Image: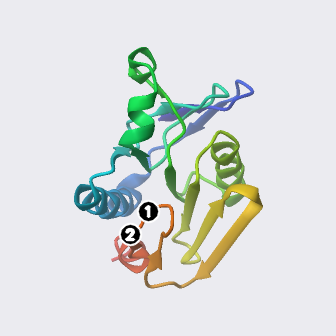
Amino acid sequence: MHFERSSRGELIVAPPTGTYGGRGEMELGAQIYLWARQDRRGFVLSSNGGIKLPDSAIFSPDAAWISWERWKAIPEAERQGYAQIAPDAAFELLSPGDTLPRLRAKAAEFLANGTRLVVLLDPRSRAVELHRPGGLIESHLHPEKIALDPELPGCLLDAQAIFDAMID
């Protein structure tokens, strides 16, 4: 099981993503990792690298990117265990145990804590939502590729490859 905790102390339990979900999650993480490796301004966390947001929520997004500048600005003690930092960008892939309203609520919580970009991917409808501070939501239906500028300059997310990894 996958466990998270909201800022209100609610325990969020989800079953593992399964084989197809794992394939999509790996494709997503690999794309962000390869971009970050070239960009060199930050690092990527997998879904097992949970973080503690400033409001005390503990989340494990499917992938997250944190800039080295923000990482090095937090005290060493807050980097241990579940590091106490909001990622610059968080990525959530809707799995069979998730609902879009729950992921949207999670996106709002990330943004309220300082995350600059939350990307929600729904393989069922092949839709992608980009959530930004101020309630700005950019929706894409059946996109092939999506630029994640300005938050991740030069990062082009291949949504089609992620969705294709989740089907035969």
Q: Secondary structure at mark 2?
A: loop
Q: Residue at x 49, y 46 (%)?
A: 61
- The single residue placed furthest to the top in the displayed view is 77
Q: Is residue 72 left or right of residue 12?
A: left
Residue that carries the numbered disc 1 in the rendered image = 152
Give residue 4's position: percent from left, percent from top.
56, 33
Give residue 84's position: percent from left, percent from top.
51, 26
Q: Is residue 72 left or right of residue 86?
A: left
Q: Quadrant of residue 157?
A: bottom left
Mark carried by residue 24: none
Q: Residue at x 34, y 60 (%)?
A: 32
Q: Residue at x 63, y 44 (%)?
A: 110
Give residue 142's position: percent from left, percent from top.
54, 85
Q: Is residue 2 above or below residue 126?
A: above
| Three-letter code, disc 1 | Leu
CB atoms of marks 2 and 1 within 8 Å: yes
Residue that carries the numbered disc 2 in the rendered image = 155
Crowding at mark 2 (Cα within 10 Å: few <14, some 14-19, many 20+): some
Is 117 or 98 nearer to us in this picture? 117
Q: Is residue 119 above or below residue 144?
A: above
Q: Secondary structure at mark 1?
A: loop
Colouring chosen for the image of the structure: rainbow
